[in-house]
Amino acid sequence: MAPDSSKAPGRSQPPRIRSLRRNLLLGILLPVVVFIIYNTSSLYRQSLQAINTAYDRSLLASAKVIGEQLTVAGYDDLAIVDSAVPYSALEAFEADNQSRLFYRVSNMSGELIGGFAELPIWRGRIAQQPPYAALVDFYNAEFRGMPVRMAALLQPVASATGRGMALIQVAETLEIRESLARDMLWGTLVQQALLFGCIAVVVVVVVRRATLPILQLSDQLNARSDHALQPLKTPAATPSEVLPLVDATNRVMARLSHLVQHQKRFVRDASHQLRTPLAVLKVQVQSAQRGDVEPEQALREIAATVDRATLLANQMLSLAKVEQLHQSEHTQTVDLTAIVRDMVIELSPLLADKNLQFELQSDEVLLAAHPWMLRELVRNLLHNAIQHSPPDAPLLLQLTQQGPAASLRISDWGPGVSAEMQARLTEPFVTGNLRDGSGLGLAICHSIVTALGARLSLHNRQHHGHIQGFDAVVEFKPNVQPPAEDGPH
């Protein structure tokens, strides 16, 4: 038998799906059940105590009736107490023939005076603060195999011929008390059950109504096509707690729509822009095959076309990668100074080809960003400045830290750009030199500074009313404080 793959070691189990309605119902109804159970128990104990108090008072009244029928002859230790109490005198205290009363009268030595001799003699003691204005003690006992409630009353007896003390015990069977307690318990349970049922119905209705907007949003999403990314419509009577979910979903929809549009634009631009160099390359190959040009010249032209196509493809991939990194929002602390120095070394052959008088002025700058973004930003800006600088001209790169903010400035001494071209420099495939560029370098820079929350300024540098050169300035927002001891290098 093949092993069960669902129980294979190392395979994570799918997360258990929890129901919002179930959590709400359990979270509300379970405390209600606990409260009702506690309340029912408390009411039952209080009712039972009230029943016992009422019937204990009746027992005391029975004992007092017996005490009123006692006679005495002699005084104190020589007193002889006599009882002539008929049992019928206690019938008025028997409730609905459901319980029976028994009594015993004895002197303080325990000798029987009257009543039921087998009734166990009282051996307790009177409380310091009895519940009634009498020397009485209430307790539970057993008589003739039946549980009974007993009252033991110390009754002074006085007459014209004597004075003494008698012990009167009255016992009552518990049928009426137990019956009343059961009736009260069942009545309480029925009331609490009805209360719980009403609460449960109300909670279920309220929870269903509260979660209905979420279900409507779910149905609205399920009914959409795969390409529908427009914002969700907020259902009527949507609770304020659900509105953040709707807003967050709409923001996700907006980001997805932006990504889809970016992907479509990338595919459209790639297919359009790569078509031209590939067509030129095909013509050049065909011309070389026919022998229209010298082989060496044909190879040079083909190599130049391949270089332009490669540059275009790499820059378009860079433009797509900027958007990808921007959506990932994964950053780290990066030493921009080290990146600038690496890019200067990387592009030093181009600086040497034009014999440019390059100068680097750099402070120590730390930024929270993706390293690849900063490298592409510096590489494209510096490459663009080198490309448009005349031979033997100065080229200045300044990296400065001013408080929590930082800026990168690259100044060349080229011819500058026209006002019309300056407004479109960051648009893709806009360039003033089709032979030397694809028009994507500054577009990549603009996308990077947007992703970093920075600002890119491109403008001509004026001197006495004449264009002296061109400046590209990136102003970074404050995010990582530089070390206090850092200074210019």
Image (cartoon, grey):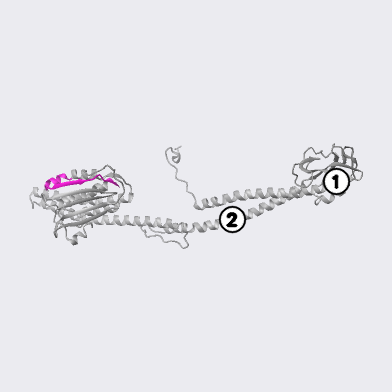
Q: Is residue 116 magenta?
A: no
Q: Quadrant of residue 127?
A: top right
Callout 2–callout 1 Cβ contact below 8 Å: no
**Lateral position of residue 148 relative to residue 336, left or right:** right
Q: Which residues are magenta?
A: 347-371
Residue 28 picture location, percent across and down = 55, 52
Secondary structure of the residue carrying numbered label 2: helix
**Lateral position of residue 52 relative to residue 204, left or right:** right
Q: Quadrant of residue 108?
A: top right
Residue 393 picture location, percent across and down = 12, 50
Label for residue 199?
2
- Choose between 255 and 425: the one closer to the eye: 425
The amino acid beneath tag 1 is Gly
Q: Is residue 366 magenta?
A: yes
Residue beneath the point at 27% across and 57% down: 265
Label for residue 157?
none
Residue 489 picture location, percent across and down = 21, 43
